[in-house]
């Protein structure tokens, strides 16, 4: 079994639920990062707001960095769910 295979996402109700939860979290992080960059960009129009604008860019960057981390964590969890199912099948035989 390999990571990032679509079949793992549809393996069971638990894997579908896990995938759906991670997709919601991933979308929330994506919107939050975009919002930070949008607000940060508009704050740069005023020199007095440069510090908060810079912090929003830093937060947005951290959120964008969290996206691949979330994707990898989701895939590892799905991978482990598949391994446990295989192990249970082997024990039954």
Image (spheres, rainbow, N blue to C red):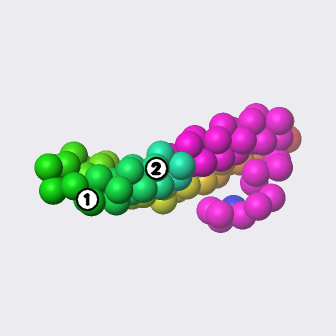
What is the quadrant of residue 1 in the picture? bottom right
Left or right of 27, for residue 16: right
Q: Is residue 81 visible?
A: no
Around disc 1, counting alpha carbons within 10 Å, would you say few (fewer than 14), some (14 to 19), or many (20 or more)?
A: some
The residue that appears at 56% across and 43% down in the rendered structure is 28
Name the element at disc 1.
loop
Seen from this angle, which residue lies furthest front? 46
Tally of marks: 2
Name the element at disc 2.
helix
Q: Nearer the viewer, residue 8 or 54?
A: 54
Q: Quadrant of the C terminus?
A: top right
Residue 31 part of the magenta segment: no
Above or below, 46 relative to 21 = below
The residue that appears at 29% across and 53% down in the rendered structure is 43
Range covered by the magenta-colored residues: 2-29
Q: Which mark is residue 19?
A: none
> Which residue is labeled 2 in the image?
35
Residue 30: % across, % down: 53, 52
Q: Disc 2 and disc 1: Cα gap in Å?
A: 14 Å
The residue that appears at 74% across and 36% down in the rendered structure is 17
What is the quadrant of residue 65 in the picture? bottom left
Residue 49: % across, % down: 19, 49
Q: Is residue 72 visible?
A: yes
Left or right of 3, for residue 45: left
Around disc 2, counting alpha carbons within 10 Å, would you say few (fewer than 14), some (14 to 19), or many (20 or more)?
A: some
> Which residue is labeled 1 in the image?
44
Residue 13 part of the magenta segment: yes
């Amino acid at each position: 079994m390999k990571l990032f295979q679509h079949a793992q996402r549809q393996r069971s109700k638990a894997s579908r639920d896990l995938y759906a939860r991670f997709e919601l979290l991933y979308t929330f992080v994506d919107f939050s990062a975009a919002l930070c960059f949008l607000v940060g960009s508009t704050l740069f129009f005023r020199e007095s707001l440069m510090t908060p604008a810079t912090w929003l860019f830093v937060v947005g960057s951290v959120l964008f960095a969290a996206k691949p981390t979330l994707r990898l964590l989701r895939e590892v969890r799905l991978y482990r769910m598949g391994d446990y199912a295989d192990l249970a099948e082997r024990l039954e035989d």
